Image: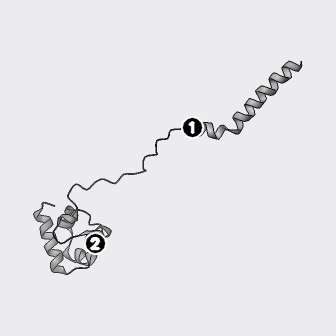
Amino acid sequence: MNRILKVIGVVGGIAAVIWAMRDRFISVATSREPEPPAFRTPTPSSPPVETIEGIGPVFAKRLSEAGIDNLGRLAGASPDLVAEAAGVSGARARAWIEQARAWGG
């Protein structure tokens, strides 16, 4: 009888240790691969607006905040929208739009 109680005690002790460390065992068993993002933004099919002469990082950021992030969108935008978004004159905005259209945007 004493031997049976020792076996039950050892088995119970092992079960208790496994139960206490279950989170550690489960985390090791799970994949370490990161979750993919919920959605992916498509890469623009046309070149970025920085391609245009006179548009640097500052103007590109301003235009991007207005939704104009590639030459296709710049070519289709109105001069007033581009001028207001970038904080430039209407003539400069028209010149950028003409360059974008010449690029085929």
Q: Residue furthest left?
A: 102
Q: Of the numbered discs in the image, which one, if any, rests on residue 67? A: none
Tell which of 53 and 42 is nearer to you.
Answer: 53
- At which x and y percent is residue 37? 42, 50
Residue at image mark 2: 58
Residue sitting at x 46%, y 46%:
35
Tag 1's secondary structure? helix
Identify which residue, 41 or 55, lies in the foreground.
Answer: 55
Pick out the residue farthest to the bottom. 89
Is 101 above or below relative to 37? Answer: below
Residue at 16 percent of width and 71 percent of height: 96
| Residue 74 place in picture, x, y as percent | 20, 67
For the image, the number of numbered tags is 2
Q: Quadrant of residue 53?
A: bottom left
Residue drawn at x 34%, y 54% is 41
User: Which one is nearer the viewer's eye here, 95 or 21?
Assistant: 21
Horizontal arrangement in the rendering, residue 30 relative to residue 100 (left or right)? right
Q: Quadrant of the C terminus?
A: bottom left
Q: Quadrant of residue 90?
A: bottom left
> On residue 28, which mark appears?
1
Q: CA distance from mark 1 to mark 2?
A: 46 Å
